[in-house]
């Protein structure tokens, strides 16, 4: 039974962090002319209305993307500036009405010779996403389990692959399956870049996930955690784990520390922790 709907959370602090890092990684792949494959294991609906429907009920974007949009984009560091420009591209007027999910962000940034493999199990969100990507010959959208889809998609024919693993973590088994899927995927294609998003919650299950991730990541990885407040009830932040990260990601994230804490942090206990091993 799938109950999670990403529309309730579209554009919140966790989306900001995830999508800003994702865009940086996609842009890194774009630096080479050679084609690459993007694999989204948990794609969601693709585009979210912020002024009505689910997102308007929770208004989570007000403490997320809206804070960055209202800042002067020219004063933001490149990683956040590129992110804000990408989101604004989906908004025809200066008012923030729409928020793009990971598959539409990738679709927007990628080139005619690149390819996208998208997976979404929820029937309603799959069907919404289908309306957004229909007719794009680069895209294969499947209503199937994204963990299995990732293993099947590796190695990509282009031999350049970037994957985002972004499960809802509503079922606790997601924490285990993430690392298992990465293990199996990396056996088939060890050089792929893999991004994992995870929630910072009081149950601290993310600690087990990280212990597993370090076992399956190989020699090159980065872990960044953005806590918007001190640990407490509900989502108090999120983490990104990046296998085979772009070499410049640590420095780019470092530049984001002050604006992220200042604009999205809920007080002095907000934090950004970055650790990495990049040979
Ligand atoms: N990646 C999206 C983004 O950044 O815009 C958000 C994805 S949302 C956090 C997780 C999505 O995964 C939900 O839409 C849910 O229906 C879907 N889902 C849950 N289990 C899945 C599975 N095993 N395979 C594929 N999709 C799944």
Image (cartoon, grey):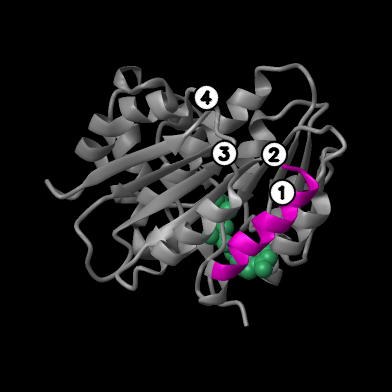
**Is residue 21 found left or right of 56 in the rendered image?**
right
Contact? badges 1 and 2 (CB < 8 Å): yes
Contact? badges 3 and 1 (CB < 8 Å): no
The answer to which of marks 3 and 4 sits earlier in the sequence is 3
Relative to 57, is 223 above or below? above
Contact? badges 2 and 3 (CB < 8 Å): no
The answer to which of marks 2 and 4 sits earlier in the sequence is 2
Q: Which residues are magenta?
A: 176-190
Residue at mark 2: 192
- Expressed as whole percent of the image width and height from the top left, the position of residue 47 reads 58, 49
Label 3 SS: loop
**Are there few (<14), some (14-19), or many (20+) residues within 10 Å of tag 4?**
some
Tell me which image quadrant ligand 1 sits in.
Answer: bottom right
Q: CA distance from mark 2 to mark 4?
A: 14 Å
Residue at mark 1: 186
Question: Main SS of the magenta segment?
Answer: helix
The answer to which of marks 4 and 1 sits earlier in the sequence is 1
Relative to 25, is 153 above or below? below
Residue at mark 4: 247
Q: Which mark is residue 51?
A: none
Q: CA distance from mark 1 to mark 2?
A: 7 Å
Label 1 SS: helix
The residue depicted at 55 percent of the width and 36 percent of the height is 220
Q: Residue furthest bottom?
A: 1
Residue at mark 3: 219
Q: CA distance from mark 4 to mark 1?
A: 19 Å
Q: CA distance from mark 3 to mark 4?
A: 13 Å
- Mark yes or no: residue 49 visible: yes
């Amino acid at each position: 039974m799938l109950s999670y709907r990403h529309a309730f959370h579209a554009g919140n602090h966790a989306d900001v962090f995830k999508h800003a890092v994702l865009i940086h990684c996609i842009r890194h792949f774009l630096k080479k002319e050679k084609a690459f494959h993007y694999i989204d294991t948990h794609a969601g609906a693709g585009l979210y209305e912020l002024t009505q429907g689910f997102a308007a009920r929770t208004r989570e974007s007000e403490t997320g993307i809206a804070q960055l949009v209202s800042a002067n984009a020219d004063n933001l560091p490149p990683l956040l500036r590129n992110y804000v420009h990408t989101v604004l591209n989906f908004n025809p007027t200066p008012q923030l009405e729409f928020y793009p999910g990971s598959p539409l962000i990738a679709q927007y940034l990628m080139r005619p010779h690149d390819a996208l493999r998208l997976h979404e199990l929820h029937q309603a969100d799959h069907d919404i996403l289908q309306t957004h990507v229909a007719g794009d010959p680069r895209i294969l959208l499947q209503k199937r389990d994204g963990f299995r889809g990732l293993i099947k998609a590796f190695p990509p024919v282009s031999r350049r692959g970037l994957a985002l693993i972004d499960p809802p973590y509503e079922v606790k088994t997601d924490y285990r399956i993430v690392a298992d899927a990465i293990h199996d995927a990396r056996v088939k294609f060890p050089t792929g870049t893999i991004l994992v998003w995870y929630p910072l919650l009081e149950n601290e299950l993310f600690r087990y996930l990280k212990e597993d991730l370090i076992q399956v990541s190989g020699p090159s990885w980065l872990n960044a955690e953005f806590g918007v407040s001190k640990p407490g009830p509900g989502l108090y932040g999120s983490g990104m784990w990046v296998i085979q990260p772009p070499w410049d990601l640590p420095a780019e994230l470092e530049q984001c520390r002050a604006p992220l804490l200042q604009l999205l942090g809920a007080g002095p206990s907000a934090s950004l922790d970055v650790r990495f091993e990049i040979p």
